[in-house]
Amino acid sequence: MTKTLVLPKLYAILDVTCFAPQLRKTNSITEFARDLAEGGVTLLQYRNKDGNTLEMLAHAREIKRVLEGKVKLIMNDRADICVAADYDGVHLGQDDLPADAGRMVVGGQRIIGISTHNPQQVKDADATSADYIAIGPVYPTTGKKNPDVVVGIEGVRKARALTKKRVVAIGGITRQNAKAVIEAGADSVAVISDLLSAPKKAAEEFLRILE
């Protein structure tokens, strides 16, 4: 990828584990993705911590088909599925492939992001071929079973000072606090929970707030 990566201020995450069990079907997932796109989302991460490989690949491919190239798509954790589903990039956690190994899988043209949770991890990520660095959780979050220590707004400021790469803030970000996170230096805010109840309307409101 290039250092001129431009990220939208809203980085939407479609986390299948946040859906009620009866809604973890392909049609419900793709409808949610379509609603986000209609609300103005232009970058979407597909995340499924509990799914098996075949399920994730099926979901990923159907999301891509439904969105028809209108939204950049990022695969969470799985560089192999990123390639198989022809996604635009992969987001890697601290326990996933290192960024440079992920780059060998997805190639030079796809986006790679890395999750970080403290200044040392930000420094380490800055030294890799990753295109963006996610920092968080900024606020307490229910998006992970075992969340990392909250870094707060100050953690976003520190991350911004440590890298020239794009910074994505994640964790407990809502319409009420998103603007403060951007003002602290994040290029983009990653949102899961505050998009769930009314995705199209919530996306529109986030984009209005972040203009």
Image (cartoon, rainbow, N blue to C red):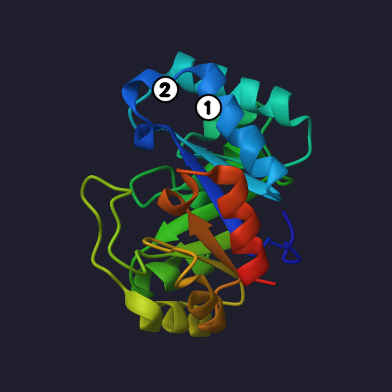
In this rendering, does residue 72 appear at all? no
Residue 148 sits in quarter = bottom left
- In the picture, measured across the screen, residue 205 lies left or right of residue 108, that is left
- In the rendered view, tell whether residue 143 sits above or below residue 78: below
**Residue at image coords 71%, 50%:** 40
Which sits earlier in the primary sequence, circle 2 or circle 1?
2
The residue located at (55%, 76%) in the rendering is: 182
Assign a secondary structure to mark 1: helix
Report the residue at 46% width, 43% height from top. 196
Residue 5: image tag: none
Question: Which residue does the image show at 69% across and 42% down from the upper left?
Answer: 37
Is 178 left, or right, of 61 in this rendering?
Answer: left
Which is nearer the eye, 70 or 91?
70
Query: Does residue 127 appear in this view?
Result: yes
Q: Position of residue 70 (x, y in %)?
A: 78, 39
Tell me if mark 1 has few (under 14), some (14-19) or many (20+) residues whose alpha carbon lies within 10 angstroms of its own: many
Q: Name the residue type under label 1.
A: Ile
Q: Secondary structure at mark 2?
A: loop
Q: Is residue 89 above or below residue 182?
A: above
**Distance of mark 2 from mark 1, alpha carbons?**
7 Å
Q: Position of residue 54 (x, y in %)?
A: 47, 14
Disc 2 residue type? Arg
Instruction: Where is residue 41? Give x, y as percent.
Output: 67, 49
Question: Which of the labelled discs sits on residue 29, or is there none?
Answer: 1
Residue that label 2 marks = 24
Contact between marks 2 and 1 (CB within 8 A): the answer is yes
